[in-house]
Each structure stands twice: as structure tokens, then as C-alpha cells.
Image: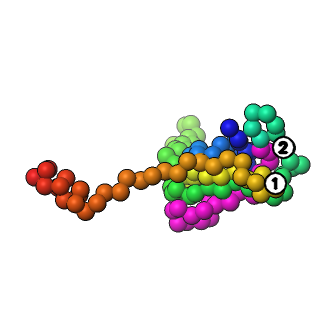
Amino acid sequence: MSYAVIQTGGKQYKVRAGEILKVEKLQESKPETLVDFKEVLAYGDDTNIEIGTPIIKGAKVEANLIKNSKNRTVLIFKKRRRKNSRRKNGHRQQYSLIRINKIFSKDGKLLSEAEKINKPVKNKKEVKKETQEKK
């Protein structure tokens, strides 16, 4: 099973094809956008590994942007004792949820690919039957 180490948002992530990952917010705003990570620090599998200095030129990781959202609220509470001074503040960090699709080597050769997700498609007849059964 192949893996890659990528850098995005000032952090490094070890990723495999098919993984869903929460990273710092990316600029692409529309869901289902294809995102390329060209800052690949290393890639390999069980037998061999390729390490960059600091990045591997030509290697890339493709991912789909699932959604952009915000994390839970982190409360910041500051109090100065005996001064009747306190301040309450909150922060919600933005993030992007991505799914890793493909990992390419520096030659452009495909190292690993994620399985495609098949969404069940209902026919109009099936939808009508379900609504009639509920009534």
C-alpha cells in the first residue's frame, strides 16, 4: 500500500489513497473540486521509499474537496482577579475536508488510486413506490 507525505497549511500529513483528511482551509470554495498537492516531501510503499530535498519535483497527490466548514468553538476566557475585569471570546477555525484520490511519482507514474464511491441512484419509479408505502 503506497503512501505519501504532503505539506499544506504549514503542516505535514502522511496520506494514503482513499483517506479522508481535515486540513487547513483551501482557497477553492466549491465542493467536488479537484485539488493538486505538489509539495510532496516523500512517498513510498512497504519495500522502497523516495525522500525529497526538501520536496520531490514532479510528484503530486490529487484529492477531491468534499466541503469547507468550521470547527467547534474554542472559548477564550481571560480574568484579572480583584479588578472586576474579564473578557470572553470565541474562535472557530476554518477547515477543508478532502479525499485523497491518486498518488503520482516524480516520473508521473500512478502509484496508488482510491476506489471510486458509487452513490446509489434511485429511479423515479422506486421513489414513487417508497412514498406510496409510507402513506
Secondary structure, mark 2, is strand
Residue 132, numbered circle: none
Is residue 7 shown to the viewer in this render?
Answer: no
The picture quadrant where one finds residue 64 is bottom right
Residue kind at label 2, given as amino acid type: Glu
Q: Is residue 41 left or right of residue 3?
A: right
Residue 58 in picture, x, y percent from top left: 81, 58
Is the C-beta separation of discs 1 and 2 under 8 Å?
yes
Residue drawn where x is 75% and y is 33% of the image = 46
The answer for how far apart the CA atoms under marks 1 and 2 are is 9 Å
Residue 127 is at least partly visible in this image: yes
The amino acid type of the residue labelled 1 equals: Lys
Q: Residue at x 57, y 51 (%)?
A: 99
- Report the disc number at residue 50: 2
Which portion, as a residue range, is magenta?
23-43
* 74 left or right, relative to 2: left
Q: Earlier in the sequence, mark 1 or mark 2?
A: 2
Magenta-span inclusion, residue 42: yes
Q: Position of residue 93 (x, y in %)?
A: 57, 52
Q: Nearer the viewer, residue 105 or 23?
A: 105
